[in-house]
């Protein structure tokens, strides 16, 4: 298939290093070569189509009250006023301290170039491909970023969790993992396992990588260990997190933070559950809870020093209809919302150009009109974090975009 | 049938449930097809509650819920809360049993393509309950809507799946009400929901590249109003939910006043026969059974047969089995985790008692958690597009590690007290004449029997088909 070339190229790389696996089962743990840049980037894909209008509510727009009269919204209904025009859904209230510290911000009315069919799956593929069409796309934009930078190691970027993260698929090496798996095998069984996989490059590379990650976990834990003082601080911050330590999204955030304290510079994973076709009032609070837990866990577990140079970008395949549907929910729409967090972002404000919600302002008289390309926002963030030049971002990472003026998303 | 030679091992591995030490592969192509139209022996031998039976649980839960609502805020609510928990627990335990029955069907069947098609169509028409006892409704849905309709016309299968209560619930159709319908005019804030209409066009019939637009979605959603269900009677068509007037989908106008079910079925039949649907289904079958990138000639052949026969599924299956590209080696498709575990049970010849006597906790350790780690939590795909087909989605470091771990640890529990098979004979039983040399070697060189069996099951030769 066209993606996941990562492991095949990884295999080729191991072979080039002379790591003949039939002869020698010795696998080196994840190495700690100097990373190509120092800032950290976390990309969270919010699958299902998050209703940006409910998360950051434009209560100052008369069209909003008109469209959503039936729903509680705005500061009078418990949403936190952000700037006199927008209010934050109560489900993200645990993040308000970050907003005040200017470590949390949003870009409203953004979208990919995907239009009209409003399919989740094509919408997500397009979001992760980062291109204007899906024809002939072989890799994801975050992988193309890695392809453009020298010195990238397998551990530079992690795709974490159960979902396939196509935005990290491609020819640059990438690590894939689901926290919580262990694999205890005798040395003999390991050798034989690699032997039975040997004639099948995909299986062989996947097993090889699993063994390296498991062997490396200990080393990473040591290298990324927190000082006692940091542990105490992290413990206090974790008091803000609501979910149990064993919730899957918590484990993923823990694991991501641990990697990012070490040699890793990029982590990508998914949070699902945004497809609120019915009973949105209730339905949105679960994924919002996961999102805020995730961000608070990242912040606590990374420690202040790493968090300070981190940008978390949470993005979704499309927004939802401006007007509620007939079942207390919203259907698939167009313009959406991007969330940003971290010490590296310029938070405490809602970025973007607000298109308005009058009937004539809407896309196809039903959806929030996108006023900015999500890819341009991501490109500017990557430019600031990695120092990659504009031409590479416009031609290789997001082919065909025009970055225009700096939207100022980073500090 | 054609002079194309027949390889029973490929038949069993690619189109069936994998090799078994005790059940012989089908004798030939005709036997494979006959196995699909004969009596459903596995459903009789390893029964699973069908949806009409399952509805009794929904009735019980909804009656109890009414009692809870009446007593909310009073101490008398307690016994009914307790009862709700018991109703949910019973459904959960039943589901554990249905999973065991499903794996036993894979283990014992002599008509293995039947089980494969049941998985294929259950995935094509993915439906998952979202709350209460309905969360356990997937197997009963498959039993009632999918299994009995896999060998007729695609239109009949499409209709059965679309109007099944679980689908109407999953994609929010049951609560979708025409904005101008009598029910909406009586008050209340309920109205249209376009979720099912969109997925019928995008996933179940035309495919996302098919010739439809937002207006078709909207019109089909209006046409669908009235399709609903209740626990006591299952599917019902409620005229008072239906949007008045005709609707136009892909240029064809359906229905009018008074609202009736028949125009909805007409629209579904037309969608089922559309050339885009023929191509969509043909490509999905070829990808599922043969390869991620199947020979285009095979897809053309299947789509042509689909179109020529008006979507008669037996004719399409026959077209699949008679095409040389369908038998081409190598056997490359990665088994999804559930298929991997089910075919491992078959290769290990796991006795029915062992699976049927598993308690919930043991089943969680044995199947549910490992399936989650392998990337396929049981009957819980993240969206209505079901599970991915691409091999690369399954052959991940975490997925392969989780499969390896399961293969090393679980077979000895599944084979107790009889004990694990002899590794060298197991290689033959599980992989047949295609067993690669390194796997034979590994099975003989492993330090323990459980590692030897694990290595055979974890080998690509077992994991691909």
Image: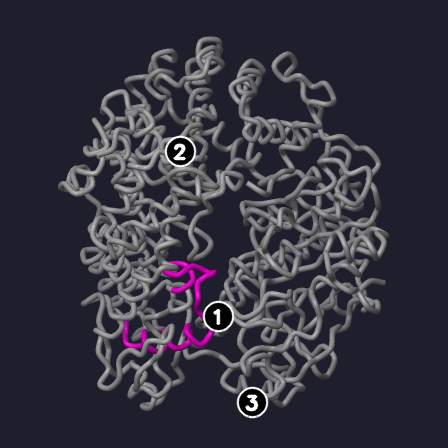
What is the number of the mark on residue A282?
A: 1
Q: Which residue is mark 2?
A: B340
| Same-chain check, marks 1 and 2 | no
Residue found at the far front of this picture:
B3
Q: Are marks 3 and 1 in contact (CB under 8 Å)?
A: no
Q: Secondary structure at mark 1?
A: helix
x, y percent for residue B93: 30, 46
| SS type, badge 2 | helix
Disc marking residue B118: none
Residue receiving disc 3 = A66
Give the answer, above or below, for where A62 lies relative to A308.
below
Quadrant of the image containing the N terminus of chain A: top right
Residue A63 image position (x, y, % from top left): 60, 88
**Disc 1 and disc 2 in contact, CB within 8 angstroms:** no
| Left or right: A232 as drawn, with respect to A94 | right
Residue sitting nearer the eye, B263 or B173? B263
Q: Is residue B300 above or below residue B413?
A: below
Q: Residue at point 32% right, 22% down?
A: B415
Give the magenta part as a residue range. B201-227
> Considering only order in the chain, which callout, 1 or 3, is on the residue closer to the N terminus?
3
Marks 3 and 1 belong to one chain: yes
Nearer the observer: mark 1 or 2; the answer is 2
Question: Is residue B257 toward the left or the right of residue A87 in the image?
Answer: left
Q: Is residue B212 magenta?
A: yes
Q: CA distance from mark 3 to mark 1?
A: 21 Å
């Amino acid at each position: 298939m066209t993606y996941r070339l990562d492991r095949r190229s990884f295999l080729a790389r191991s072979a080039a290093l002379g790591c003949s696996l039939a002869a020698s089962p010795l696998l080196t743990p994840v190495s700690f070569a100097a990373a190509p840049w120092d800032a950290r980037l976390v990309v969270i894909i919010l699958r299902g189509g998050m209703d940006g209008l409910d998360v950051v509510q434009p209560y100052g727009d008369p069209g909003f009250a008109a469209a959503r009269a039936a729903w509680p919204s705005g500061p009078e209904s418990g949403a936190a006023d952000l700037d006199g025009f927008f209010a934050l859904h109560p489900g993200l209230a645990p993040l308000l301290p970050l907003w005040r510290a200017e470590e949390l911000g949003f870009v409203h009315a953004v979208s990919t170039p995907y239009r009209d069919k409003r399919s989740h799956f094509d919408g997500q593929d397009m979001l992760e491909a980062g291109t204007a069409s899906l024809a002939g796309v072989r890799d994801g934009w975050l992988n193309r970023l890695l392809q453009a930078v020298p010195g990238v190691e397998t551990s530079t970027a992690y795709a974490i969790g159960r979902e396939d993260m196509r935005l990290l698929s491609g020819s640059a090496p990438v690590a894939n993992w689901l926290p919580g798996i262990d694999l205890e095998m005798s040395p003999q069984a390991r050798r034989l396992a690699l032997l039975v996989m040997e004639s099948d490059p995909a299986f062989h590379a996947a097993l090889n990588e699993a063994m390296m990650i498991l062997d490396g976990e200990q080393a990473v834990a040591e290298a990324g260990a927190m000082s006692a003082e940091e542990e105490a601080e992290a413990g206090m911050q974790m008091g803000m997190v609501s979910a149990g330590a064993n919730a899957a999204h918590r484990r993923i955030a823990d694991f991501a933070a641990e990697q990012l304290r070490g040699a890793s510079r990029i982590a990508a994973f998914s949070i699902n559950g945004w497809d609120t076709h019915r009973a949105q009032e209730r339905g949105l609070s679960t994924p919002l809870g996961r999102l805020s837990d995730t961000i608070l866990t990242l912040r606590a577990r990374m420690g202040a020093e790493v968090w300070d140079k981190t940008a978390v970008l949470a993005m979704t395949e499309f927004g939802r209809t401006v007007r509620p549907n007939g079942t207390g929910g919203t259907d698939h729409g167009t313009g959406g919302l991007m969330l940003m967090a971290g010490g590296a972002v310029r938070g405490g404000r809602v970025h973007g150009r607000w298109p308005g919600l009058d009937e004539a302002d809407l896309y196809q008289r039903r959806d929030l009109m996108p006023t900015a390309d999500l890819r341009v926002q991501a490109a500017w963030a990557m430019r600031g974090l990695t120092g990659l030049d504009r031409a590479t971002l416009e031609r290789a990472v997001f082919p065909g975009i025009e970055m225009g003026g700096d939207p100022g998303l980073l500090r | 049938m054609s002079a194309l030679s027949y390889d029973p091992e490929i038949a069993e591995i690619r189109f069936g449930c994998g090799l078994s030490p005790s059940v012989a592969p089908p004798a030939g192509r005709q036997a494979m097809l006959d196995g699909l139209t004969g009596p459903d022996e596995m459903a009789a031998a390893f029964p699973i509650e069908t949806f009409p039976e399952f509805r009794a649980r929904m009735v019980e839960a909804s009656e109890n819920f009414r009692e809870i609502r009446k007593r909310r805020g009073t101490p008398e609510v307690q016994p009914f809360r307790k009862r709700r928990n018991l109703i949910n627990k019973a459904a959960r335990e039943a589901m554990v049993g249905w999973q065991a029955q499903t794996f036993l069907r894979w283990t014992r069947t002599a008509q293995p393509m039947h089980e494969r098609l049941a998985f294929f169509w259950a995935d094509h028409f993915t439906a998952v309950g979202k709350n209460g006892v309905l969360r356990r409704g997937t197997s009963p849905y498959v039993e009632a809507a999918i299994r009995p309709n896999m060998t007729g016309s695609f239109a009949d299968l499409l209709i059965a799946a679309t109007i099944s209560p679980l689908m109407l619930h999953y994609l929010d159709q049951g609560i979708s009400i025409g904005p101008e319908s009598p029910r909406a005019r009586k008050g209340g804030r309920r109205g249209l929901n376009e979720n099912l209409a969109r997925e019928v066009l995008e996933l179940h019939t035309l495919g996302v590249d098919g010739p439809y637009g937002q207006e078709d979605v909207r019109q089909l959603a209006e046409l669908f109003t009235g399709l609903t269900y209740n626990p006591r009677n299952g599917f019902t068509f409620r005229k008072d939910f239906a949007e008045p007037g005709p609707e136009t989908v892909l240029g064809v106008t359906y229905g009018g006043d008074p609202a009736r079910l028949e125009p909805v079925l007409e629209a579904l039949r037309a969608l089922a026969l559309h050339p885009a649907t023929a191509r969509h289904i043909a490509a999905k079958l070829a990808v599922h059974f043969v390869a991620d990138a199947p020979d285009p000639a095979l897809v053309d052949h299947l789509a042509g047969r689909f179109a020529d026969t008006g979507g008669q599924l037996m004719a399409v299956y026959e077209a699949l089995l008679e095409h040389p590209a369908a038998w081409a080696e190598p056997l490359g498709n990665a088994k999804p985790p559930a298929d991997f575990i089910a075919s491992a049970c078959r290769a290990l010849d796991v006795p029915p008692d062992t699976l049927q006597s598993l308690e919930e906790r043991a089943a969680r350790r044995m199947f549910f958690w490992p399936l989650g780690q392998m990337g396929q939590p049981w009957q819980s795909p993240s969206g209505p597009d079901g599970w991915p087909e691409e091999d690369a989605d399954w052959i991940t470091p975490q997925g392969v590690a989780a499969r390896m771990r399961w293969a090393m640890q679980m077979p000895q529990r599944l084979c107790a007290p009889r004990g694990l098979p002899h590794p060298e004979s197991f290689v033959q039983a599980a992989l047949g004449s295609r067993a690669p040399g390194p796997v034979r070697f590994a099975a003989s060189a492993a330090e323990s029997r459980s590692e030897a069996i694990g290595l055979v099951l974890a080998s690509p030769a077992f994991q691909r088909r």
